[in-house]
Image (spheres, rainbow, N blue to C red):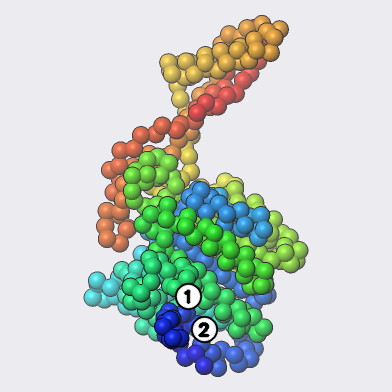
Amino acid sequence: MLLGEAFIADCTAGTYRYRNLHAGVPVIAELHRNQSADTQVAKLDLNVYIYLMDSLSRVNFVRKLPRFYKFLVEEMDAVVMTGFNTVGDGTPWSMIPVTTGHFQTELYEARKRFTNASFVDGWPLVFKDYKQAGYITSYGEEQPQFSFFSYKLKGFNKLPVDHYLRTFLLAANTEAKHHKPYCLGDQPRSIALCHWWAQQQDIYAAERRTFSIVFSSETSHDDYNLVQVLDEHWERTFREQLHRGYFNNTLIIMGDQGRRFGAVRQTQSGKTDEKLPFLAVVVLPSFRARYPDAYRNLQINTRRLVTPFDLHTTLKHVINFTTPGRGDVMQRGISLMNEIPAERTCAHAWIKPHFCSCLVWTDLDVDATGVRDAAAYVVERINRLNEDAGGSCAPLRLDRIVSARMLKPSESMLAFKESADYDNISPDLSADVATPNVLYQLRFTTVPSGADYEASLN
């Protein structure tokens, strides 16, 4: 019988020796007992599996993991949130809102360098809510030495979940010298995490629901190009687990933020990319049929402003289900099963200006030389198209510019260079970044037709 979450297999056959570290799920008798009346599984009766990928934006997920992305979207019908915006700098500023519904600064002091710091056990962690709802809970971070609960924070005093992979992952760091980089034997360590989660499904699927967070980090944090070596591995592993029925539940795959450092990060596109991590949600076909309004809202929200606070509220909604409807724009967290209002802004969502990826419209003087030159260029292009089509219409001349405006990232977001303090609370807004990509929108009239045109120029 397996007694812990990790074991080393070391055996010899003739001249051949096998040695490898394995993750396991020990049998804990009390977890297999019948649930009491006050811990019945929630109405939605769904498993929750969050597979977190460090420093992976939506754009880079699509670019670096094309096979995995295609599989998620085309074969698992993943709903991808294109407006998922981070609310702070670094993993804790994404995952503490996801797991607690709060900013770190709203919770009691747990930063370990302060003498009054306490363990995070007393934080309102969502693990506790799922445990109370009768779920088996589990949690594992690939690089435990950088855990967002213990790298800068004091960490846990007691086991936070039923199955905690920290022992295995600390041992994996020690065992690394016996293996190729990023691997344990013949498999990447990130894939070992996937298999550990699958073992939980083998053990508990028939009797209990599970809530799991697994954090893959070492192949994506330092170099987002390296993550592409796992594209085929992830696609194959998730496909095998899909065919075995492991995903008959809810699956959430997300990044904590985009790339936070490097030369690309100092460009306009890099700064925007940092604020827009990947987020995809997969739900059962039976869920779509039973809760069509919730699924419709999920699809609507792919084009709405979404934050980690919304993901936390969604997790609470799963175990405290109410009829889906329209979210309150004044609420910081809105369940993804409710429609997020289209008028939601970064201010509504508690996103500080230097982390807001929304573009800003600025009205321009219609008599400015650049505006008039742009309008004249558009009229010239229209006349050229007319000539190419046979020239049957009279050439147009610019009559009047009705309005002009410019769309570009906010100055605050472009000015964000890095965090100015150890805890990533205060921003350094000294960056000087050019804005090569600006969209101009013009409305003007022409003669002799008197036509009213609207044009966009990049």
Taking the view exactly as shown, the residue that stands out farthest to the front is 14
Q: Position of residue 281 (x, y in %)?
A: 60, 60
Q: Which residue is mark 2?
A: 25
Q: Position of residue 87 (x, y in %)?
A: 43, 55
The image position of residue 319, as x and y in percent, is 61, 73
**Does residue 287 appear left or right of residue 61 in this picture?**
right
Q: Amino acid at mark 1?
A: Tyr
Could you say which quadrant of the image residue 320 lies in?
bottom right
Q: Position of residue 177 (x, y in %)?
A: 33, 73
Which element is circle 2 on? loop
Label disc, if present, on residue 139 of the rendered structure: 1
Q: For this rendering, which residue is in front, 118 or 63?
A: 63
Q: Is residue 387 above or below residue 9?
A: above
Q: From this view, report whether residue 190 is shown above or below residue 374.
A: below
Residue occupying image coordinates x 56% and y 70%: 49
Residue at (47% x, 55% y) in the render = 228
Category of crowding for the residue at label 2, using alpha-carbon neighbours closer than 10 angstroms: few (below 14), some (14–19), many (at least 20): many
Height in image: 379 above or below 57?
above
Question: Mark 2: which amino acid?
Answer: Val
Please report contact status of discs 1 and 2: CB closer than 8 Å, yes or no.
no
Q: Residue at x 53, y 67 (%)?
A: 50
In space, the residues marked 1 and 2 are separated at their CA atoms by 12 Å
